[in-house]
Amino acid sequence: MDTVLIFAGSEAPQFEMSEELPKPDLVVAADSGYDYAVRLGFRVDVLIGDMDSISEIEVPGHVIVERHPTDKDASDLDLALELVVRDAPERVVIVGGAGGRLDHELSTAGLLCSDRWRRIDEVDWVSTRGWAYVVRRRRIIHGDVGSTLSLIPMGGDVSDVHTSGLRWDLAGHTLVYGSTTGLSNVMRAPVADIRIGEGCLLAVIAAD
């Protein structure tokens, strides 16, 4: 399996942003993410969660439904990631999950950078706030020249950071967890190459 889209709850991206989504091999909806997926014209393969916020009463017969109790130790998005990582896809793109509760949004950012998903080569997040890319070892990021790109260390210091294609390129720098050194860089080329030694970065291109 190459590419999986996971539609999360809260606020889905605008239709224009959704047109930039890759063609999926599998579409998974986490609870009310099903509503957003259908609204954007995607055929959902799997629906997972406690179903406490989905608006659809019935779903088509082809959809595999995995229902969980409301009182559980993991969010619906966490359950969806646990489901898809079993098949070790090359890329997972989470759609939505921002613009709602602040605690949900912050926990999602941390969740995506969990070591549990190290087997997935590329983990991305798109929402009304823009695109975010999990960086382990190396990522090639495409964007518009002049776009703001921030490099945020997640869960600890990130060492030996090298970049090209940015206004302020880094060459072997360490981005300290909790610092703001990587904020508000700018893409000076349509492609940014980011390489790191140890740690995990969240590279964020904010929406205009």
Image (cartoon, rainbow, N blue to C red):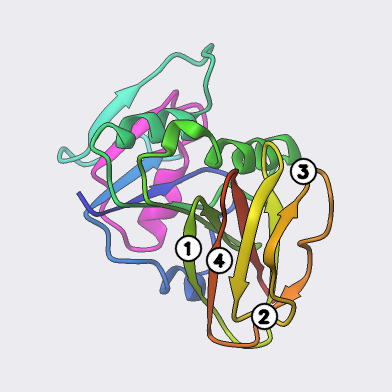
Query: Mark 4 or mark 3, which has the lower sequence index?
Result: 3
The span picked out in magenta is 30-54
In the figure, residue 48 lies in which quadrant? top left
Q: Are marks 1 and 4 in contact (CB under 8 Å)?
A: yes
Inter-mark Cα distance, 1 to 4: 5 Å
The furthest residue to the left:
62
Residue 76 falls within the magenta-colored stretch: no
Query: Mark 4 or mark 2, which has the lower sequence index?
Result: 2
Look at mark 3 in the image and give the residue it sits on: 177
Task: Name the mark on residue 67.
Answer: none
Residue at image location 42% in from the left, 39% down from the top? 118
Q: Amino acid at mark 2?
A: Ser
Q: Are marks 2 and 1 in contact (CB under 8 Å)?
A: no
Residue at image location 45% in from the left, 23% down from the top? 50
Q: Residues within 10 Å of mark 2 (few under 14, many from 20)?
A: some
Q: Up-down: is 169 above or below 121?
A: below
Q: Amino acid at mark 1?
A: Arg
From the viewer's perspective, is 22 left or right of 151? Answer: left
Residue at image location 65% in from the left, 81% down from the top? 187
Look at mark 1 in the image and give the residue it sits on: 139
Query: Mark 1 or mark 4, which has the lower sequence index?
Result: 1
Residue at image location 40% in from the left, 18% down from the top? 68
Task: Name the mark on residue 194.
Answer: 4
